[in-house]
Image (cartoon, rainbow, N blue to C red):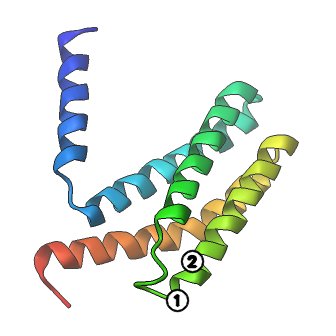
């Protein structure tokens, strides 16, 4: 491993371990959207393994969002859980069928959620309400 790669890995580890919970969610959403983009690119280029890896990683992130969403604190979170479930189901189908349109549709649902989480995290960091 090069010195530059070592520093980059160290920076990434420290960024995750020192991030606020809201920042961690936005970082996961950023990675989720990157995975979906990578899956679309892979499917279009017929790079099946790369697309599969991106889709399964995206599903892992969505599962984590789903299981950690505490609806006892936020009962309206049940609707968000259903969105996560739908996204997971659709990404499984996209992976089986190698269907880029489905990946695109899922991304279209998740982009506004990502933007909302980023806005909430930014407001929380600046103390705005």
* Residue, disc 1: 76
Identity of the residue drawn at 49% across and 72% down: 113
Identity of the residue drawn at 77% across and 29% down: 46
Q: Is residue 42 above or below residue 80?
A: above
Front residue (pair 66, 89): 66
Quadrant for the N terminus, please.
top left
Query: In the rendering, at what x and y percent does residue 104 appear?
Result: 69, 57
Query: In the rendering, at what x and y percent does residue 69 appear?
Result: 47, 70
Q: Quadrant of residue 11?
A: top left
User: Whole-Å distance between the Cαs marked 2 and 1?
Assistant: 7 Å
Q: Is residue 64 left or right of residue 51?
A: left
Outermost residue, left side: 126
Outermost residue, top side: 1
- Describe the element under mark 1 as helix, strand or loop: loop
- Describe the element under mark 2 as helix, strand or loop: helix
Asked if disc 2 and disc 1 are in contact, CB closer than 8 Å, the reply is yes
Query: In the rendering, at what x and y percent does residue 120 appear?
Result: 30, 77
Q: Is residue 33 left or right of residue 12?
A: right
Q: Residues within 10 Å of mark 2 (few under 14, many from 20)?
A: some
Q: Is residue 73 above or below residue 52?
A: below
Q: Is residue 63 above or below residue 117?
A: above
Q: Is residue 128 left or right of residue 71?
A: left
Query: In the rendering, at what x and y percent does residue 115 appear?
Result: 42, 71
Q: Residues within 10 Å of mark 1 (few under 14, many from 20)?
A: few
Front residue (pair 23, 50): 23
* Residue, disc 2: 80
Identity of the residue drawn at 20% across and 77% down: 124
Q: Which mark is residue 10?
A: none
Q: Quadrant of residue 121?
A: bottom left
Residue 47 shows up from this direction: no
Identity of the residue drawn at 65% across and 43% down: 55
């Amino acid at each position: 491993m090069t010195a530059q790669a070592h520093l980059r890995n160290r920076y990434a580890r420290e960024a995750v371990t020192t991030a606020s919970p809201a920042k961690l969610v936005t970082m996961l959403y950023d990675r989720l959207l990157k995975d979906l983009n990578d899956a679309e690119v892979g499917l279009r280029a017929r790079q099946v393994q790369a697309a599969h890896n991106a889709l399964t990683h995206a599903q892992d992130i969505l599962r984590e969002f789903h299981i950690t969403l505490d609806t006892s604190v936020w009962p309206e979170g049940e609707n968000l859980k259903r969105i996560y479930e739908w996204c997971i189901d659709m990404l499984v189908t996209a992976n089986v069928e190698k269907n880029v349109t489905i990946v695109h549709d899922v991304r279209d649902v998740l982009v506004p959620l990502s933007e909302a989480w980023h806005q909430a995290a930014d407001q929380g960091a600046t103390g705005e309400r």
